[in-house]
């Protein structure tokens, strides 16, 4: 089949990889290069936020963790770390699929994949090109203008506009990169009112973060940068002298739940909110099944 994938972030590229690998003739149309997408801002830790849970999310997460483990791709490392959760919170069901899970009151410790997203996305785009996928850099205004047997709508925040779906909204997130002093473990602190995370990738550590519903600017706020640095240095004192390398903002494509369904000649795959890196391979498998 001739398939056009709209979107060149983590979701569009993962779908294009699966579809081309299955023998389809695939074109990706994307307004932005991979390094300029929301996907390239993500901290890149592989598990979904506590607020996101369903059997589907558990299955997509388990599939993605297995895939990232076996890829041997640049930008992917496997590390142990700790997720702090409110003491009264039940154990999230996806946690059972994590190897070497060790849980205590208000704490889950396990090994998962960490994705240095700009490095990994550049590699994934190269793999996709190697499978014969063409990429066009332009903005699509209407899905039914596209000349293809089937269209995959994987345009993140733009997917909502293309599908006329007003439930897709931006939730801004700012992160700060610090030089990595050699941290061996990741920490995500979901037990405090404002999420804190410290995700080491070797050259740099991604520290965060914020959740800003309705934000439309991707210009980092210097006051927020200073606050993130302070909060993350409190959490991990080894960062005390780590130089600040820069700050980034991304707009998470939020929706009450991921839309992954076929509607005629369009397969919709969008609305991954704060979990798109985690869900990408599981969703790409389901897109292929719908095709
Ligand atoms: C600060 C922050 C931290 C995060 N941390 C994590 C994490 O640790 N783990 C995790 O799993 N997730 C994390 N996320 C969430 C994750 O980044 C998103 O869920 C994911 O990037 C969504 O991917 P996407 O491909 O759907 O969208 P995007 O990456 O936004 O890609 C959308 C693509 O569609 C294209 N596009 C849009 N409209 C059009 C159009 N009309 N025509 C043509 N092309 C179009 C864009 O150019 C782009 O290529 C984080 C997000 C942020 C902001």
Image: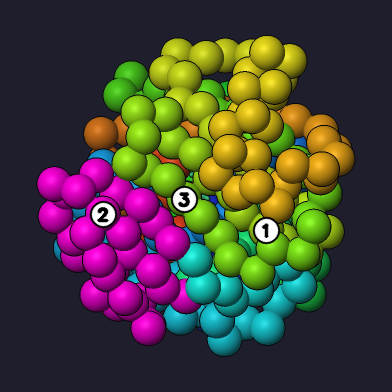
- Tell me: is circle 2 under 8 Å from ligand 1: no
Q: Which residue is mark 2?
A: 106
Could you tell me residue 43's position as x and y percent?
60, 48
The colour scheme applied to this rendered structure is rainbow
Dot 3: what SS? strand
Could you tell me residue 168's position as x and y percent?
37, 27
Crowdedness near tag 2: few (<14), some (14–19) or many (≥20) residues, C-alpha within 10 Å: some
Crowdedness near tag 1: few (<14), some (14–19) or many (≥20) residues, C-alpha within 10 Å: many
- Tell me: is circle 3 under 8 Å from ligand 1: no
Horizontal side of 131 relative to 163 (left or right) equals right
Say which residue appears at 33% left-offset and 77% top-offset.
Answer: 101
Dot 1: what SS? strand
Say which residue appears at 57% left-offset and 86% top-offset.
Answer: 70
Could you tell me residue 183's position as x and y percent?
69, 63
The number of callouts visible is 3
Which numbered disc, 2 or 1, marks the residue closer to the eye?
2
Say which residue appears at 75% left-offset and 30% top-offset.
Answer: 247
Instruction: Give the residues in magenta.
Output: 82-111
Q: Which residue is mark 1?
A: 200
139 lies above or below 20: above
Dot 2: what SS? loop
């Amino acid at each position: 089949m001739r398939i056009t994938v709209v979107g060149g972030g983590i979701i569009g590229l993962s779908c294009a990889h699966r579809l081309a690998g299955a023998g389809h003739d695939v074109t990706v149309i994307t307004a932005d290069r991979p390094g300029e997408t929301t996907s390239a801002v993500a901290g890149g830790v592989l598990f979904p936020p506590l607020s996101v849970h369903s059997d589907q999310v558990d299955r997509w997460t388990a599939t993605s963790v297995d895939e990232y483990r076996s890829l041997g791709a640049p930008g992917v490392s496997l590390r142990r770390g700790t997720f702090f959760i409110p003491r009264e919170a039940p154990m999230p069901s996806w946690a059972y699929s994590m190897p070497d899970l060790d849980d205590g009151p208000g704490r889950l410790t396990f090994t998962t994949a960490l994705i240095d997203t700009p490095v990994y996305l550049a590699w994934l785009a190269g793999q996709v090109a190697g499978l014969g996928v063409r990429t066009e850099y332009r903005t699509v205004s209407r899905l039914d203008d596209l000349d293809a047997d089937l269209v995959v709508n994987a345009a993140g925040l733009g997917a909502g506009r293309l599908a006329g779906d007003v439930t897709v909204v931006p939730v801004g997130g700012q992160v700060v990169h610090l030089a990595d002093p050699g941290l061996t473990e990741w920490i995500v602190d979901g037990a405090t009112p404002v999420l804190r995370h410290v995700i080491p990738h070797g050259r740099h550590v991604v520290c965060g973060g914020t959740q800003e519903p309705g934000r439309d600017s991707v210009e980092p706020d210097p006051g927020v940068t200073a606050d993130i640095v302070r909060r993350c240095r409190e959490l991990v004192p080894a960062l005390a002298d780590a130089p600040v390398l820069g700050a980034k903002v991304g707009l998470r494509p939020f929706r009450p739940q991921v839309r992954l369904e076929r509607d005629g000649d369009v397969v919709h795959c969008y609305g991954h909110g704060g979990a798109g890196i985690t869900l990408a391979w599981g969703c790409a498998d389901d897109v292929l099944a719908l095709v």
